[in-house]
Image: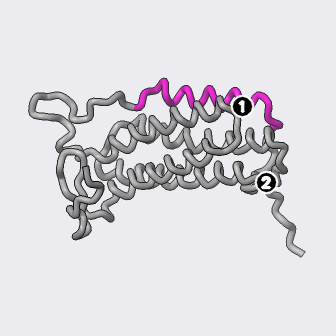
Amino acid sequence: MKIYTKTGDKGTTALFGGTRVPKHHIRIDSYGTVDELNSHLGLIRDQDINNHYKDVLIDIQDKLFTVGAILATDPEKAILKSGKERLNIPKISEEDINQLEKEMDIMNETLPPMTHFVLPGGHQTVSFCHIARCVCRRAERLASALNDLEPFQPESLMYLNRLSDYLFVLARKLSYDLQADEVKWIPKKES
């Protein structure tokens, strides 16, 4: 199988279902940003971190492929003539969202309470988490805009929202585990 097909040479690409759209279409931007996020999570997973976090990240990466597939499906062709769904994969569930919340609750048990915003940084691995969090927020914004135009499975949007929270807590937990400085943002007073 060749990787290059030349079908996108004129600036269009195919959605799942065959519909061709411009490569700058919000649907493409949405699932492309989810793909970018998934790559950043792979970078975090490649760091020297606890195996439990690596396992959770692999599960999240799997769920992001599901979100990407949902976003990449033409809503007008999501249901086949037979009445079956075109996507024959498990959808994002409330349980998936609850799992992220459970992981955050467990991490938060060992963290000092937040009294201020924190500046991203302190350790390279922590910085990777903050970059992923920002990309996740962008994916969520794009998916939200797409959802306004062409609604899709609500749990997918909820999952992206909860995932950005998870990545923030993971950054704090890794700061704690790695004994990195967590620099509080304290606005300077005007002189």
Q: Is residue 133 magenta?
A: no
Residue 155 appears at what percent x and percent y?
42, 34
Q: Is label 2 or label 1 in front?
A: 2
The one of 38 and 85 positioned closer to us in this rendering: 38
Residue 176 appears at what percent x and percent y?
80, 40
Q: Residue shown at 62%/46% (left/top)? A: 44
Q: Which residue is mark 2?
A: 122
23 vs 115, left or right, is left
179 vs 161, left or right, is right
Q: Which of the two labelled residues, at mark 2 and mark 1, occupies the earlier sequence position?
A: 1
Is disc 2 in contact with disc 1, using a CB cutoff of under 8 Å? no
The one of 11 and 184 positioned closer to us in this rendering: 11
Q: Residue shown at 29%/48% (left/top)? A: 150
Amino acid residing under circle 1: Met
Above/below status of 65 relative to 124: above
Q: Residue shown at 31%/61% (left/top)? A: 25
Q: Residue shown at 30%/47% (left/top)? A: 72
The one of 9 and 181 positioned closer to us in this rendering: 9
Above/below status of 127 relative to 68: below
Q: Main secondary structure of the magenta part?
A: helix
Above/below status of 33 relative to 65: below
Q: Is residue 106 magenta?
A: yes
Amino acid residing under circle 2: Gly
The one of 163 and 123 positioned closer to us in this rendering: 123
Q: Quadrant of the C terminus?
A: bottom right
Q: Which residue is the extreme one toward the top?
A: 95
Q: Please tell me whether mark 2 sits on a helix, a strand or a loop.
A: loop
Q: Which residue is mark 1?
A: 107
Q: Which residues are magenta?
A: 92-113
Identify the image quadrant of residue 93.
top left
Q: CA distance from mark 2 to mark 1?
A: 18 Å
